[in-house]
Image (cartoon, helix red, strand yellow):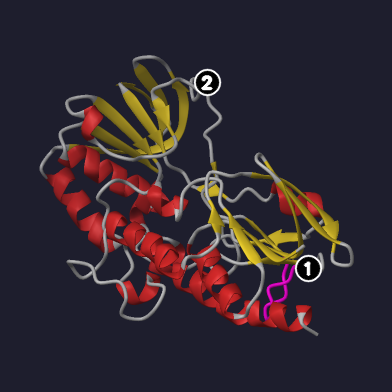
Amino acid sequence: MLDLIIIGGGPAGLSAAEAAAHEGLDYLVIEKGTIANTIRQYPVGRTMFSTPNEVEMHEGTLKPVREKPTREELLSHYIHFVLNLDLKINTGEKVVDVTGNVNDGFVIKTDVAEYRAARVLFAIGAMEIPRRLNVPGEDLPKVHHLFVEPYPYVRKDALVVGGGNSAAEAALFLSEEGARTTMAIWREDWENRDPKAGAMKHWVRTPLEAEIEAGRLKVVLYKQVDEITEDEVRLTTETGEALTLANDVVFVLVGSDADLTLLRKLGVEMEPGKLSEVPVYDPETFETTVRGIYVAGHFTHARHIKAAIDVPRRIIPLIARVLNH
């Protein structure tokens, strides 16, 4: 029986693995994708919004070329953190079920193997389930819920639906690289300038507005998308007018949620969060309402990467103390 299974190989999971190794725990990280899989899903070449001190595993160890790291620099930082410490992490292995209890231990089944552990820490990402518009045509091959790069869409008609940073970045990258781009956004999102209320970052908005000023990017203040077809998109503007756009590709970037299925199945209670439901947990230990099941990372109330790295360093020693009692 392992002391601890950590589900998720992002910043929270890697921080937990280091802390577990330091405490002498017999642990294993299980990650269904690659190391820092959520970061890998960011657009190619993207500059992060955070400075190194907010995302690095240890102070002074992330040394980007410019003030803020790119997606690639941050990915490399996390990968070499794993390699340098020789952390125990199984990638490309998906957890499909967790059963058991704190008294008898937990059974963790994956698509590869089965494990037993005294404690389980969920350090999963918050981008697992993209939110959908739920309109006809959303399942067409031209519709994407993730933006990776603009280059396949040069001189194509692209529509980006959404009002956050991800949507704004996608619209900006597409427009800059020669796609005929339209961004459909709600007025309240477009006029929002309050960072605490989720307004798009000024360093995205400023170049975005420059693209609009230059006539390369169009913005439609919309009420709803009505239908997506092979070569068009029909939507209703905020004034109630019907608008049809010729279209080759659609990016629906209206947010995403963590997959809390396994936690719910275990009986963990949920509560409303800032953007979506989050598990109920002790703010000191991050233990959920099911004893022996812990949470950390972007899907908790501690949403920032820095918190995702810091929290496991506080709670893993507490878990070790209980196990060694």
As drawn, is 154 to the left or to the right of 311? left
The amino acid type of the residue labelled 1 equals Gly
Residue 34 percent coordinates (x, y): 46, 49
Q: Is residue 121 above or below residue 266?
A: below
Tag 2 residue: 136
Q: Nearer the viewer, residue 134 or 104?
A: 104
In terms of secondary structure, what is the magenta stretch mainly?
loop
Crowdedness near tag 1: few (<14), some (14–19) or many (≥20) residues, C-alpha within 10 Å = many
- The quadrant where residue 155 appears: top left
Q: Is residue 256 above or below residue 316?
A: above
Q: For the residues marked 2 and 1, what is the alpha-carbon distance in whole angstroms? A: 43 Å
Tag 1 residue: 292
In primary-sequence order, the first of circles 2 and 1 is 2
Residue 227 percent coordinates (x, y): 46, 21
Callout 1 secondary element: loop
As drawn, is 306 to the left or to the right of 29? left
Residue 24 percent coordinates (x, y): 63, 78
In this picture, which residue range is highlighted in magenta?
280-288
Q: Is residue 236 magenta?
A: no
Crowdedness near tag 2: few (<14), some (14–19) or many (≥20) residues, C-alpha within 10 Å = few
- The quadrant where residue 159 appears: top left
- State whether residue 200 appears in this view: no
